[in-house]
Image (cartoon, grey):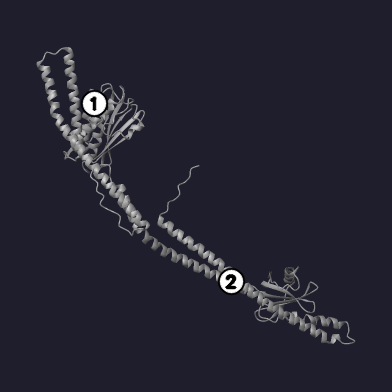
């Protein structure tokens, strides 16, 4: 299964997110603790009020019992109907309603049966509980002891209530209840206040945290910028100066340690680059001087070789030896000339800047290659119109000749070699030298433009090579503002040279 890469977040964003998450968790914990504490406090106060309401309800029931005892139904000769009248008087307090404030509920139960229950509305009017509410009230209190003053919550049609049962002296069970709406409303307002305060705290924390983190991370961002600038610099060759340094920060801080480490690293890198540059300059100077000094003796060797041919009567072996000496001296002269050219290109020596027809150079170079490489198949594809570039005619000719010679020397007989020149837009001329030979080994492709790099036996031909042809091609191409690329696989090897047109050079 392919795993999708996770999006990267900056350190600044991560720190602000962690800060906001911490504040959010703290606000959540504080809100939960505050809500629980206030809820317990309000519940305790509601239970205390409920206890006082229960005491008042017991007094009302007691007053009803006293009225029944002293009423006309208790005297001698009282009829049976007086008993009913006395029972009504007994629950008169419950029927008349609770004596407390709005919403208060009161009921009386005898032998577990709810005989009367009523509640007082906001206007002070007393209403009997409906049969459904009386059943809910009885079910909520079922199983509790008569003396149990612990409150229970019950949802009635008139709202949520906290109810409790108390034992009256006459044996009745007096039920009292108070609405839970005010407590719930208080908790709702508290929760809203805590939520708004938490959002405000998160907003302030986000703004202040972003400012503080940005201010704190600014030196580190400067360090990152300097490191990125140095990483983007071409350090492989030439004179390199790393003048910029990270700003000094207070020692002992993390940013200060990073700045100090980066500055120390830049000092070491600059020292190493300076040493490398001096070594390269000494090497180039040595190669240039040695090559220049070798030209004179090589010219003398070739001169004496020609003189031997003209003045001496050589045997067959002697002639063979003289010819061999002449061939090797010419090869050595070519190597010296290549080294001198590379040294001049490395030093940035001035070159000719003429307007040239690259198509004409390619045609002439391919005709010469056909003469020396008759065992190869050569094809040419150039535009009909001139392809004008600016540069040195001799050096650009050497580029084309070296690429064609490279294709001829490192491919077997019968290989097809194509030279294709085309225009890419109005800015570049693109030259491709393509062969269908065995290709360049993958391990060698990264080093093929290195000096004195030779192909292995799989691509080597019969002619000896110095390993300087492709490095000279790249050096000349680069000095003309162009580039060269290699794409090789078995059956197809392509060198692509790009040069700016004369109009854009």
Q: Judging from the image, what secondary structure is the residue with disc 1 in?
A: helix
The residue that disc 1 covers is 369
The picture places residue 55, in percent across and down from the top left corner, at: 71, 79
Mark 1–mark 2 Cα distance, whole angstroms, equals 98 Å
Disc 1 crowd rating (10 Å Cα; few below 14, some 14-19, many 20+) is some
Residue 499 x, y percent position in the rendering: 25, 39
Tag 2 or tag 1, which sits nearer the N-term? Answer: 2
Q: In this orientation, which residue lies closer to the viewer: 288 or 152?
A: 288
* Position of 239 relative to 221 (above/below): above
User: Could you say which is closer to the camera, residue 389 or residue 171?
Assistant: 171
User: Would you say 376 lies left or right of 140 here?
Assistant: left
On the image, numbered disc 2 is attached to which residue?
38
Which of the pair 250/397 is nearer the observer?
250
Which of the two residues, 232 or 160, is positioned nearer the viewer here?
A: 232
Pair 1/2: label in front = 2
Kindly give the residue lying farthest to the top in the view shown.
Answer: 315
Residue 449 at what x, y percent from top left? 28, 34
* Quadrant position of residue 344: top left
Which corner quadrant of the image does residue 129 belong to? bottom right
Q: Position of residue 151 (x, y in %)?
A: 69, 72
Residue occupying image coordinates x 17% and y 18% = 323
Side of 411 where 161 appears, left or right: right
Q: Quadrant of the C terminus?
A: top left
Rendered position, 227 above or below 477: below
> Where is residue 426, by image quadrant?
top left
């Amino acid at each position: 299964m392919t795993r999708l890469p996770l999006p990267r977040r900056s350190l600044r964003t991560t720190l602000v997110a962690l800060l906001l998450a911490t504040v959010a968790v703290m606000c959540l914990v504080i809100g939960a603790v505050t809500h629980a504490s206030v809820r317990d406090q309000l519940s305790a106060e509601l239970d205390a009020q409920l206890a006082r309401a229960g005491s008042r309800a017991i007094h009302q029931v007691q007053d009803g019992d006293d009225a029944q005892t002293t009423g006309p139904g208790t005297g001698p000769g009282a009829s049976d109907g007086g008993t009913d009248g006395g029972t009504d008087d007994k629950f008169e307090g419950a029927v008349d309603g609770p004596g407390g404030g709005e919403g208060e509920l009161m009921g009386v139960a005898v032998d577990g049966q709810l005989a009367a229950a009523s509640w007082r509305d906001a206007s002070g009017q007393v209403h009997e509980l409906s049969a459904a509410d009386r059943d809910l009230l009885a079910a909520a209190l079922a199983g509790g002891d008569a003396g149990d003053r612990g409150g229970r919550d019950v949802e009635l049609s008139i709202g949520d209530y906290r109810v409790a049962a108390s034992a009256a002296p006459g044996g009745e069970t007096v039920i009292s209840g108070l609405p839970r709406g005010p407590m719930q409303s208080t908790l709702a307002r508290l929760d809203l206040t805590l939520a708004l305060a938490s959002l405000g705290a998160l907003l302030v924390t986000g703004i202040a945290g972003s400012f503080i983190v940005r201010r704190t991370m600014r030196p580190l961002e400067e360090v990152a910028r300097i490191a990125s600038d140095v990483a983007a610099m071409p350090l492989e060759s030439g004179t390199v100066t790393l003048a910029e340094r990270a700003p000094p920060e207070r020692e002992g801080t993390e940013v200060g340690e990073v700045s100090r480490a980066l500055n120390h690293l830049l000092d070491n890198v600059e020292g190493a680059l300076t040493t490398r540059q001096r070594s390269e300059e000494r090497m180039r100077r040595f190669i240039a001087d040695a090559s220049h000094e070798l030209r004179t003796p090589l010219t003398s060797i070739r001169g004496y070789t020609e003189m031997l041919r003209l003045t001496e009567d050589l045997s067959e072996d002697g002639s063979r030896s003289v010819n061999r000496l002449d061939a090797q001296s010419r090869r050595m002269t070519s190597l010296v000339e290549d080294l001198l050219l590379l040294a001049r290109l490395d030093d940035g020596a001035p070159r000719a800047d003429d307007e040239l027809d690259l198509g004409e150079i390619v045609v002439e170079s391919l005709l010469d290659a056909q003469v020396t490489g008759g065992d190869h198949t050569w094809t040419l594809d150039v535009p009909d119109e001139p392809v004008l570039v600016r540069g040195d005619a001799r050096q650009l000719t050497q580029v084309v000749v070296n690429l064609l010679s490279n294709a001829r020397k490192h491919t077997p007989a019968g290989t097809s070699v194509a030279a294709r020149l085309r225009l890419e837009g109005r800015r570049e001329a693109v030259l491709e030298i393509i062969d269908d030979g065995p290709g360049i080994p993958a391990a060698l492709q990264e080093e093929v433009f290195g000096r004195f790099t030779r192909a292995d036996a799989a691509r080597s031909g019969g002619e000896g090579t110095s390993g300087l042809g492709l490095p000279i091609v790249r050096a000349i191409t680069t000095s003309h503002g162009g580039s060269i690329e290699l794409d090789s696989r078995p059956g197809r090897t392509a060198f692509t040279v790009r040069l700016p047109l004369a109009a854009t050079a």
